[in-house]
Amino acid sequence: MQFFFLSVRGLLSAVFKDLQGHSLDVGLMPGSSDFYANQKMATLRRISEPHGTLMGITFGIVGLPNVGKSTVFNAITSAGAMVANYPFCTIEPNVGVVPVPDPRLNRLSEIYKPEKTTPTTLEFLDIAGLVKGASKGDGLGNQFLSHIRQVDAIVHIVRCFDDENVVHVDGTINPARDIEIVETELILKDLDTVERKFAEAEKKAKVGDKKAKGESEFYARLRDHLRGGRLSRYYAVGNEEEAHWMHFLYLLTRKPVMYVCNVREDELQKQNPYVDQVRAIAAKEEAKVIVISAAIDAEVAELPEEERKGFLQELGLKESGLTQVIREGYDLLHLITFFSVSAKEVHAWTIPIGTRAQEAAGSIHTDFEKGFIRAEVMAFSDIDRFGSEHAVKEHGLLRVEGRDYVVQDGDILFIRFNV
């Protein structure tokens, strides 16, 4: 899950040599501790550089203190962030790299029996709980809002349960109020960003910079929009130049949002008036809503992989909160998955819908994009049905596509290139 960014990249360990005119055997690290440690450090570096480029699909987790934010983060990443019944227990942003579960990847591994199987990944960034005044530095405030400036989407955790043992920072449970508090702080942070850019552009305009004059006028209109308490995603840019200026503001309220309603274990499949409040707000914003129990997902995360499905079935659940977040996150950011396969490695890759073959090749390695010749393509449904690459070829279902071919979800690509 650029704004948004084109691919989820791992750290390449293969030595690329003697590959001219051949398809790639991609050599990326499996899910080792070193892999995830390096991913975490890279993410921390990227979030500290507000004008850098994130390489992975990243979700920023926000919410008030004690809504279950860090519990949800732990459940979906099994990363062990601190969990405590008091505000601001998350002192620094926690970063987790999550393998994306995909049964198609498992099926391809059964067919090819590779030395290793590498899923695509998503990154989750958990920041300290927000309170009124966070944009001005109250609580642990301002610095944490800056941490999420370059995430691809925001996962907003909303408390939708009563529990006298878990204090609410404002004393009562009111999802509509809680959402308004967080959105207001995001708007105020965006307003601060726009006002600073307006001051810079206005100073240049006063010395005769004609381009800066148009830029300052754009920031002034956007500033007035935000001052009216409206999210920047509802501001309509007038032309490509304004779209360019808007893009590099990295405004928090322009990012797509997914609301995650955290409910009690025994209320997960019941009507919940708190959840109804969230759904009503999300409908107006055209945002997504997921209902989970962080407590259940925390239990699932502690179980061995082979026991999780049975545990969920006993509770009458088809999938975990993690699976819901990933599935809806893909839809929210308009993402799909394609695969590269060989005897050495079966690898899943994430790209936006509409990505062309040459761009998809660049997701694997930049040399493949530069020296792209063609892509040989199989559909997952075909190899799943016939059981082997050879059988797919015998049925005439292996296609040769050029650089402008739009990659489809589930495509298996063999990239031919020459550098």
Image: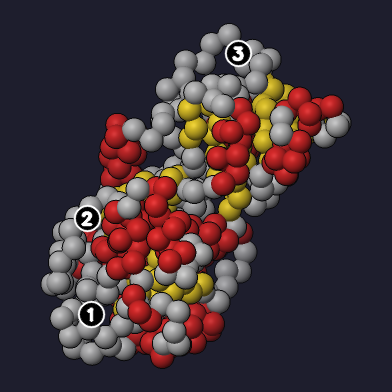
Q: Residue at x 54, y 11 (%)?
A: 17
Please name the residue that numbered disc 1 is placed on: 132
Q: Earlier in the sequence, mark 2 or mark 3?
A: 3
Residue 309, numbered circle: none
Q: Is residue 299 visible?
A: yes
Q: Quadrant of the C terminus?
A: top right
| Marks 2 & 1, CB-CB < 8 Å contact | no
Give residue 220's position: percent from left, percent from top.
44, 74
Figure colour scheme: secondary structure
Say if 201 sits above or below 31 in the image: below
Q: Earlier in the sequence, mark 3 or mark 1?
A: 3
Residue 282 location in percent, x, y?
A: 49, 80
Q: Label 2 sits on what residue type?
A: Ala
Given contact means CB atoms under 8 Å apart, are the residues at marks 3 and 1 in contact?
A: no
* Mark nearer the viewer, 3 or 1: 3
Separation of disc 2 and disc 1 at Cα? 24 Å
Q: Which residue is mark 3?
A: 19
Q: Which mark is residue 81?
A: 2
Question: Could you tell me residue 125's position as x and y percent?
Answer: 33, 55
Which element carries disc 1, helix, strand or loop?
A: loop
